Image (cartoon, grey):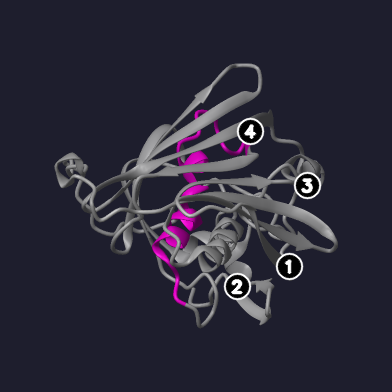
């Protein structure tokens, strides 16, 4: 897999490639790439004004694998704190929206309170795939990412930790930012840490929430994910986010959990979100 997630086909228009495919329906997009696309456009808008410290990406319906338009607007201007939003519109419908808080950094902060790196698991050697045996072999999104599981995997229920490295650009010919690399993989946390068999149940994340005290450094990002279920169709995935030097922050995903329907009826259920 060498193609990017998107081609820029206009000033604010982006055409998705096969690398964006959802595991539930290959005519739809996985939630990670559109999240990264939206955050990257907000980063352009806030450049020089501080660092994005919190982001919420809401999936407002199925995200077709078709060309979409991104629009960015400022909701709360400010010198030290600001709030910006970006929407992805496909076929006249807003399918996803990101809201980001940006905060000014300070050179005068006391370095004694800076977070100290905690011991992290080593990056394991590469293992032969497939890493997602419950999903179609022709699913292209995971081929755009390198996966090194520390424990757990998508083929067995329970918590999981995996080192990830994004192999392709978010947008062809444009530099992928550290925040974008994080967004590409963070939406997969519920899929790797499912508590029920993926071939029998759908886990539909309606949003991805990121709280970050810093952005990742280097290519490798560790997702340490755990999913909790209520027993009545609602769940939450909470993920510790790390790079090789320590913690970055956390990701949270609210989940709708439902039995999988026959193949011909799945698209209506998966329309709630684009993630895994």
Q: Is residue 179 magenta?
A: yes
* Residue labelled with disc 1: 68
Relative horizontal placement of residue 244, taking residue 190 as reference (left or right): left
The image shows residue 66 at horizontal and vertical percentages of 74, 68
Q: What residue span does the magenta drawing correspond to? A: 175-204
- Please determine whether, in this image, residue 166 is positioned above or below residue 182: below
For the residues labelled 3 and 1, the Cα–Cα distance comes to: 20 Å
User: Few, some or many C-alpha atoms within 10 Å of disc 1 (few <14, some 14-19, many ≥20)?
Assistant: many
Q: Which residue is mark 4?
A: 201
Quarter-of-image position of residue 166: bottom left
Earlier sequence position, callout 2 versus callout 1: 2
From the viewer's perspective, is the residue at label 2 or at label 1 nearer?
A: 1
Q: Secondary structure at mark 3?
A: helix
Whole-angstrom CA distance, mark 2 to mark 3, is 23 Å
User: In the rendered structure, does residue 105 fall within the stretch colored magenta?
Assistant: no
Q: Using a 10 Å C-alpha cutoff, classify the residue at mark 3 as few (fewer than 14 neighbours), some (14 to 19) or many (20 or more).
A: some
Marks 3, 1: nearer the viewer: 1
């Amino acid at each position: 897999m060498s193609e990017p997630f998107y081609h820029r086909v206009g000033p604010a228009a982006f055409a998705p490639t096969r690398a964006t495919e959802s595991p539930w329906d290959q005519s739809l997009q996985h939630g990670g790439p559109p999240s990264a696309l939206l955050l990257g456009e907000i980063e352009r808008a806030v450049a020089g004004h501080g660092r994005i410290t919190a982001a919420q990406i809401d999936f407002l319906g199925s995200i077709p694998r078709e060309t979409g338009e991104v629009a960015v607007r400022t909701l709360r201007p400010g010198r030290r704190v600001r709030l910006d939003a970006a929407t992805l519109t496909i076929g006249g419908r807003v399918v996803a929206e990101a809201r980001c808080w940006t905060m000014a950094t300070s050179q005068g902060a006391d370095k004694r309170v800076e977070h100290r790196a905690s011991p992290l698991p080593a990056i394991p050697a590469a293992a032969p795939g497939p890493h997602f045996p419950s999903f179609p072999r022709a699913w292209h999104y995971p081929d755009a990412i390198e996966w090194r599981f520390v424990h757990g995997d998508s083929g067995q229920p329970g918590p999981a930790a995996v080192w990830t490295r994004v192999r392709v650009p978010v947008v062809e010919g444009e530099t992928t930012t550290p925040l974008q690399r994080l967004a590409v993989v963070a939406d997969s946390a519920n899929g790797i840490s499912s508590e029920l068999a993926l071939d029998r149940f759908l886990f539909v994340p309606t949003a991805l929430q990121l709280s970050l005290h810093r952005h990742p450094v280097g290519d490798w990002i560790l997702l340490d994910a755990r999913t909790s279920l209520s027993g009545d169709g609602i769940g939450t995935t909470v993920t510790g986010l790390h790079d090789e030097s320590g913690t970055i922050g956390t990701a949270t995903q609210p989940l709708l959990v439902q039995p999988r329907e026959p193949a011909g009826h799945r698209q209506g259920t998966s329309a709630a979100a684009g993630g895994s």
